[in-house]
Every structure is written in C-alpha cells, then in structure tokens.
Image: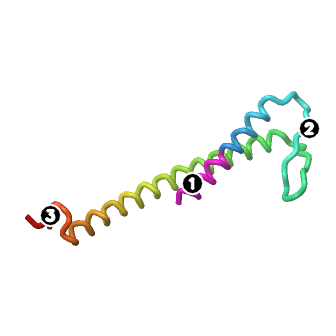
Amino acid sequence: MSAQLQQVQQQRTEVDSAKEAMDGLEEGAAVYKSAGALMIQVKDVDTLKADLIERSEELEVKVKSYSKHEESLKKTVDDLRNELTVALGKGPAGGMS
C-alpha cells in the first residue's frame, strides 16, 4: 500500500508542477503534452489547465483514500499482534506470575 501511495503522491506532484509551469507562460506560448512516445502541441491551453486541475483533484482523493486504508491496515495489524501476544500468554491478560 505504501508504494501505491508514494506513486500517487509523485504523480500529483508532477501534475501540480505542470500547472505551476503553465501559469508562468506568456500568452500564446506553445504548449505540448505527451501522448505515449509523442509530444503533441496543445491548441486549447485553457482546457489543458482544466484537465490538470481535475487530475490533481482526482489524485488528491486517491492519496486520502490510500492514506486512510493504510492507517486502517496498520491498526488491524497492531490489534492482531496484541491478540496473538495475549493468546501466547505473553501479554498482560494471559501472563504467568
């Protein structure tokens, strides 16, 4: 899960960097986007900006979802570890005196 979270965070960073770079462009500057192995000139820069904003928002939702799921998994692992420790008689509830 952690690798997926890092990958989505990296993608979001790249999208946000692209948005910032576009904000600094002069009016009428040529803008290209990658399409597989090709670079294609974009005619409608405003649509591309809107697409980048939308993609950034989608990635943010994924980051939050993965983070929440990761925390849930960690809690489950901790709970199971505690149960196992108690079941093996090494925990506070089942320890031998």
Q: Would residue 62 be found to the left or right of residue 74 on screen?
A: right
Measure the C-alpha gap from mark 2 to mark 1. Answer: 33 Å
For the residues bearing labels 2 and 1, Cβ distance under 8 angstroms: no
Question: Which residue occupies the extreme front position in the image?
Answer: 97
Which element type, helix, strand or loop, lies under badge 3?
Answer: loop
- The residue at the point 58 percent across, 47 percent down is 60
Which element type, helix, strand or loop, lies under badge 2?
Answer: loop
The picture quadrant where one finds residue 56 is: top right
Residue 16: x %, y % from top left: 69, 40
Disc nearer the start of the sequence (2/3):
2
Name the residue carrying label 2.
Answer: 30
Q: Nearer the viewer, mark 2 or mark 1?
A: 1
**What is the magenta segment's predominant secondary structure?**
helix
- Residue situated in front as seen by the camera: 92 or 4: 92
User: What label sits on residue 5 in the rendered view?
Assistant: 1
Q: Would residue 43 be found to the left or right of residue 15 on screen?
A: right
Q: Which region is colored magenta?
A: 1-12
- The residue at the point 91 percent across, 38 percent down is 30
